[in-house]
């Protein structure tokens, strides 16, 4: 409001100048008005700047808090939540949607206050000066609202959703394009981007067009109607009319010519911001929904249990990924401390799913899993993840130094401990050969071969040193020498611990204390290697078809 | 900035140029229309309603013309935005697809991601929301300066001088925030990358989060983004304040001059004409300042977009793998490495040294060697994912560097060590191998790769969605789909990297059978730790310390007391998983 002072001041000065009334007294008056207007102007500017600054800083704090809250929340949702959507969507929600809130938090109220104030001041001022002229000058503005409002209605919910989905699709497509670049190069059209990326770009453009196309003309019209030139034209037209009618003096047109066009700016800003608010509100709703994502069941305070011992028991466990198709059913299995239990079976039988349940990536749809007598659901998460370590089937390193990757589960571990773990996983030497040794960053100066990455994952699990260890195809990419070395090191380490091993190569598990054969999500048979062979069931058949019989014999014979 | 913009637009640049001219013309038009105010107002104030009405008509014609023209400009602006969103994104995509694999580090990937998704959005908004007011906002004041000169030369002079001063301040203020802006965008890109990692590696991050180590990286990135955001806000506010205060100071100066002049004239007695001129000049100085304020207000948006453009420019500046000038055609399905030496980085010892290997069309060669011995690397050289340092790689008797990328890719089909599937259905993923494959061919590939069993179990069959990277499938299922994808392509050369590592005995046998059927028809190069697969090969090549140490058949090598024999013994002697008895 204060920033409008010079306009009013100018009007005043002009009036004095033209009327030339009481030349002497006016002189000082003019200066006074000029100075006062500028004092007001700069004071107003300073206030605006301060207000904007405060709002932006608050927004920065708020978005930061929201992002942290989302990390916290999403760390507790069932893992299926992640596998049922693309990483790009997660990023869009955490980064872009929250960024869109900016319009709402940083701009909305300051703009509303500032623009609203300015408009109000102008209108009142003009009404006070001359109500007829004021009404005439304000004539274009209702039209603006009419057209603008109609245009905004054209932004249907559906188009808006399409637009946002289109954006998410681009996000996803870029991620896939980049992650799958070898596949794109090997199978794509040479020199062309990944097909899904191209489609996503085109689809987005279409969504964008259908979103903006209906807006272009009305918005251009609306903006033209309140463009300062137009407003001036209207003011002068009516001014001329009123003057010739003798309703007002020519000089009285001036304040209107000065003030009325000044309303356009704030009004356009309000229109613009209301657009941002629509975006922001939609984004806020998405963020809100995300913050309320169903978590894994949290134990009620007081019901927390602490596992006594490291025995693992599956009691009549069943699981279905999508709630209908059972991947596991009635699994009863006990992993005794100090033993190795091997799980074998055809691909897709549910071995990895069994391992994931033990890690509580999701809860069984039926039955329960006990660790040291305590239901996994009642064990505090950090306690659980200190008790169970694993090497997953898919090798996954994070973009951090080799050291940090190994120390992921125990950031407080000492250098020696980390190196000892690397040695156990027979990857120490290779790490030392990297440009910056343990400080080399994965994906940047530490690009490793498949087997090497796998061994880092093993070192990570070894360092965690948990009482229960799950190894899902942990050495599938290791060569014979490394595999033997790792198995030996882990066998030594595993004394007194519980080991669950998933393996396809039966020769690697023939010394396990118990072998569990899975078929279609159920346990088909279990026993030691010798027992199962003599039983002549599924295991014996697998052993035969793998051709291990000859190999082992050969090893024994010559 | 404009240059980068035009580079980004490539052949669509004329659309942009046309738009710029239109915007400038619009600025001129509105300047002239505003100039028409002068006679209207002068006559009105002088009490000449009739003359004023005449000029008013001129003014109104101008207003209508402005309006019509603005619509055109806006349409053209949207057109440019579309070209950015579509054309430029395609251009970046195609460019990136031609970059060497080595470029795709996490840092570069993060930047690319940020530039294509958020950056392009920001840049596309420029014409529609920013350029029009800025371009016209820069032209209109110039017209007004001329008029001001005519009315009151001192004011004209001040306005004229203010223009370069203002441009200078504007540039300085933009400089001011640029570094902070860059840092902010870099951090935002990194945070985005961390979020993607958070989603993709959730299982690992969560299971190792006992001490908060898993979410630590993302949290740190978020904190960093906040800090750089704060810095950016402070600097931006400073530059906004600077810009707008300078503009307002110009207004103040103009007003002062007017006041002084009015004073002087009032002192000298009344003289209607010049005083009216002065008053009109006052009004004009307002019109002079307003567009400049607009320009100042858009400084932020301009600077942000500038940085995004810069990021895009850097990506476009990376030179892609060179294509030959006179491409040659491969003669057959042979693969040959001649005295090949290769290293990934100049400061590292060579990984492969003096490798000589010839694979005849239709033969099957197994590569064996310790983990990290360079087996996968050798395959990558054949597919020209990297170029050799010395020596040459020949496919069909032609150096891969003398073939077009398209021709080479057509010769080779690959099964990678780390399987990657795209979001979509099983069928779509297999068809990536050959989009025009018939249903019969699809069915055949499915049968040969053992995908039949997966499809039979899934309720949605071939239409089962696999999730990002194939996350909704088991390890072995993923692998078999990638095998089907490679088989359906039906290229003369098949490179197979650890294709059976995640498979059970039965499926492995199925794949082995498929491979044995392909023998003699396709050239096969196989990397395997599985004895059964290795034993099938016509020739086994043992890699060690960057060189080929042994070559021969399974039986021949087993009889020797070399690396291969040792490798076999180790496998057999290993006790596998057990818990050691007390020491
Ligand atoms: N995230 C998921 N969403 C839906 N279905 C899934 C998901 N993960 C796995 N499945 C399905 O569950 C079944 C069992 O998968 P699991 O990974 O447990 O198999 P597996 O025995 O480990 O096989 P492999 O030996 O191939 O690794 C498979 O049919 C698979 O397609
Ligand atoms: N892009 C890369 N940049 C730098 N070094 C790399 C890169 N890729 C691999 N290396 C290094 O080169 C060596 C050989 O890697 P390669 O992937 O060829 O091994 P490999 O024989 O396939 O091993 P594995 O059996 O474990 O898959 C490894 O030590 C690895 O760390
Ligand atoms: Mg599995
Ligand atoms: Mg490899």
Image (cartoon, coloured by chain):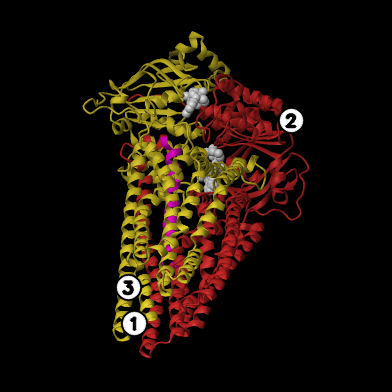
Dot 3 alpha-carbon crowd within 10 angstroms: few under 14, some 14 to 19, many 20 or more: many
Dot 1 alpha-carbon crowd within 10 angstroms: few under 14, some 14 to 19, many 20 or more: few
Looking at the picture, tell me which residue is in the foreground, A372 or A217. Answer: A217
> Residue A185: where, in percent of width, then height?
63, 43
Q: CA distance from mark 1 to mark 3?
A: 21 Å
Tag in front: 1 or 3: 1
Of labels 1 and 3, earlier in sequence is: 1
> Residue A210: where, in percent of width, then height?
57, 45
Question: Where does the N terminus of chain B fall, quadrant-wise?
Answer: bottom right
What is the chain letter for disc 3? A
What is the chain letter for disc 2? B
Chain that is coloured red in the picture: B
Work out whether A88 lies above or below A22: above
The residue positioned farthest toward the top in the image shown: A535
Region in magenta: B174-202
Work out whether B415 lies above or below A135: above
Q: Which disc is residue A37 wearing?
A: 3
Chain that is coloured yellow in the picture: A
The residue carrying mark 1 is: A21
Q: Is residue A383 magenta?
A: no
The reply to whether the C-beta atoms of the residues labelled 1 and 2 are less than 8 Å apart is: no
Give the main secondary structure, helix, strand or loop, of the magenta stretch.
Answer: helix
The residue carrying mark 2 is: B520
> Residue A336: where, in percent of width, then height?
33, 19
């Amino acid at each position: 409001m204060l920033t409008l002072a010079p306009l009013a001041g100018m009007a005043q000065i002009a009036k004095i100048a033209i009327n030339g009334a009481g030349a002497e007294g006016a002189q000082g008056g003019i200066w006074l008005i000029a100075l006062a207007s500028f004092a007001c102007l700069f004071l107003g500017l300073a206030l605006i700047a301060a207000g904007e600054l405060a709002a932006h800083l608050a927004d920065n704090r708020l978005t930061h808090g929201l992002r942290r809250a989302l990390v916290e929340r999403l760390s507790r949702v069932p893992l299926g939540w992640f596998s049922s959507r693309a990483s790009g969507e997660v990023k869009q929600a955490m980064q872009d949607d929250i960024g869109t809130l900016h319009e709402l938090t940083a701009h909305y109220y300051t703009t509303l206050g500032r623009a609203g104030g300015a408009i109000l001041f102008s209108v009142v001022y003009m009404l006070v000066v001359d109500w007829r002229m004021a009404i005439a000058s304000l004539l274009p503005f209702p039209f603006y609202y009419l057209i603008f409002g109609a245009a905004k209605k054209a932004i249907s919910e559906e188009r808006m959703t399409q637009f946002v989905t289109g954006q998410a699709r681009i996000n996803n497509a870029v991620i896939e394009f980049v992650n799958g670049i070898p596949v794109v190069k090997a199978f794509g059209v040479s020199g062309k981007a990944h097909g899904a990326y191209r489609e996503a770009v085109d689809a987005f453009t279409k969504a964008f067009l259908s979103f903006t196309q209906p807006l272009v003309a009305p918005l251009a019209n609306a903006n033209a109607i309140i463009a300062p030139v137009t407003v001036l034209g209207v003011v002068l037209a009516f001014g001329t009319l009123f003057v010739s009618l003798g309703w007002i003096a020519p000089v009285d047109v001036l304040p209107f010519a000065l003030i009325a066009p000044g309303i356009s700016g704030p009004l356009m800003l309000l229109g613009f911001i209301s657009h941002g608010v629509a975006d922001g509100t939609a984004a806020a709703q998405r963020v809100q929904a995300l913050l309320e994502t169903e978590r894994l069941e949290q134990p009620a305070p007081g019901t927390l249990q602490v596992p006594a011992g490291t025995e693992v028991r599956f009691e009549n466990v069943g699981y279905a990924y999508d709630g209908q198709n059972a991947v596991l059913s009635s699994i009863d299995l006990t992993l005794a401390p100090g033993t190795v239990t091997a799980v074998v079976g055809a691909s897709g039988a549910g071995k990895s799913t069994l391992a994931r349940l033990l890690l509580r990536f999701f809860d069984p749809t039926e039955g329960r899993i006990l660790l040291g007598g305590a239901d996994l659901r009642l064990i505090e998460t950090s306690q659980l993840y200190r008790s169970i370590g694993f090497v997953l089937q898919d090798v996954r390193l994070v973009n951090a130094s080799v050291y940090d990757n190994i120390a992921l589960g125990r950031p407080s571990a000492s250098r020696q401990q980390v190196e000892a773990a690397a040695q156990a996983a027979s990857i120490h030497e290779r790490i030392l050969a990297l440009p910056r040794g343990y400080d080399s960053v994965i994906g940047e100066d530490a690009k490793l071969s498949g087997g090497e990455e796998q061994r880092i994952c093993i070192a990570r699990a070894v360092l965690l040193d948990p009482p229960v260890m799950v190894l899902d195809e942990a050495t599938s990419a290791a060569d014979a020498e490394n595999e033997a070395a790792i198995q030996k090191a882990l066998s030594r380490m595993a004394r007194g611990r519980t080991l669950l091993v998933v393996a396809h190569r039966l020769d690697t598990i023939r010394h396990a204390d118990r072998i569990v054969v899975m078929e279609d999500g159920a346990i088909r048979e279990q026993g030691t290697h010798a027992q199962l062979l003599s039983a002549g069931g599924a295991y014996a058949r697998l052993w035969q078809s793998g051709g291990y019989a000859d190999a082992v014999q050969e090893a024994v014979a010559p | 900035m404009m240059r980068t913009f035009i580079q980004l637009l490539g052949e669509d640049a004329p659309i942009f140029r046309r738009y710029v001219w239109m915007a400038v013309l619009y600025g001129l038009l509105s300047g002239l229309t505003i100039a028409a105010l002068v006679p209207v107002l002068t006559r009105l104030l002088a009490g000449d309603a009739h003359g004023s009405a005449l000029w008013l008509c001129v003014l109104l014609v101008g207003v209508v013309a402005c309006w019509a023209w603005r619509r055109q400009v806006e349409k053209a602006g949207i057109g440019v935005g579309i070209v950015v969103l579509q054309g430029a994104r395609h251009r970046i995509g195609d460019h990136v697809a031609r970059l060497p694999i080595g470029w795709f580090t996490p840092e570069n990937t993060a930047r690319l991601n940020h530039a294509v998704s958020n950056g392009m959005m920001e840049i596309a908004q420029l014409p529609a929301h920013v350029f029009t007011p800025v371009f016209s906002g820069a032209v209109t004041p110039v017209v007004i300066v001329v008029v001001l000169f005519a009315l009151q030369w001192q004011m004209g002079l001040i306005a004229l001088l203010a223009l370069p001063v203002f441009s200078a301040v504007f540039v300085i203020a933009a400089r001011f925030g640029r570094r902070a802006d860059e840092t902010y965008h870099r951090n935002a890109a990194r945070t985005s990358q961390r979020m993607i990692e958070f989603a993709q590696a959730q299982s690992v991050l969560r299971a190792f989060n006992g001490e908060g180590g898993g979410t630590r990286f993302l949290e740190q990135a978020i904190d960093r983004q906040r800090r750089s955001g704060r810095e950016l806000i402070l600097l931006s506010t400073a530059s906004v304040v600077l810009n707008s205060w300078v503009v307002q100071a110009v207004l103040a100066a103009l007003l002062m001059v007017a006041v002084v002049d009015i004073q002087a004239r009032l002192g000298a007695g009344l003289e209607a004409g010049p005083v009216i001129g002065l008053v009109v000049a006052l009004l004009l100085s307002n019109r002079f300042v307003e567009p400049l304020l607009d320009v100042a207000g858009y400084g932020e948006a301009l600077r942000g977009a500038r940085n995004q453009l810069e990021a895009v420019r850097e990506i476009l500046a990376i030179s892609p793998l060179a294509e030959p000038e006179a491409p040659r055609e491969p003669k057959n399905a042979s693969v040959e490495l001649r005295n090949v030496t290769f290293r990934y980085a100049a400061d590292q010892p060579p990984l492969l040294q003096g490798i000589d290997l010839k694979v005849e069309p239709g033969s099957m060669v197994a590569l064996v060697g310790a983990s990290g011995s360079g087996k996968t690397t050798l395959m990558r050289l054949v597919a020209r994912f990297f170029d050799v340092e010395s020596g040459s790689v020949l496919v069909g008797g032609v150096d891969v560097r003398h073939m077009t990328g398209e021709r080479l890719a057509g010769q080779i089909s690959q099964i990678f060590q780390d399987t990657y599937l795209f979001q979509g259905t099983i069928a779509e993923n297999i068809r990536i191998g050959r989009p025009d494959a018939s249903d019969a061919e699809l069915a055949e590939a499915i049968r040969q790769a053992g995908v039949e069993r997966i499809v039979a179990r899934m309720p949605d069959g071939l239409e089962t969605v696999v999730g990002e990277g194939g996350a909704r499938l088991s390890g072995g299922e993923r692998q078999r789909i990638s095998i089907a994808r490679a088989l359906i392509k039906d290229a003369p050369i098949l490179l197979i990297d650890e294709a059976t590592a995640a498979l059970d005995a039965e499926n492995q046998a199925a794949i082995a059978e498929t491979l044995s059927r392909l023998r003699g028809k396709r050239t096969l190069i196989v990397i395997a730790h599985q004895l059964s697969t290795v034993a099938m090969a016509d020739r086994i090549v043992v890699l060690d310390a960057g060189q080929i140490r042994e070559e021969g058949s399974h039986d021949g090598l087993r009889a020797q007391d070399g690396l291969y024999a040792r490798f076999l013994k180790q496998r057999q002697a290993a006790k596998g998983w057990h818990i050691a008895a007390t020491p």
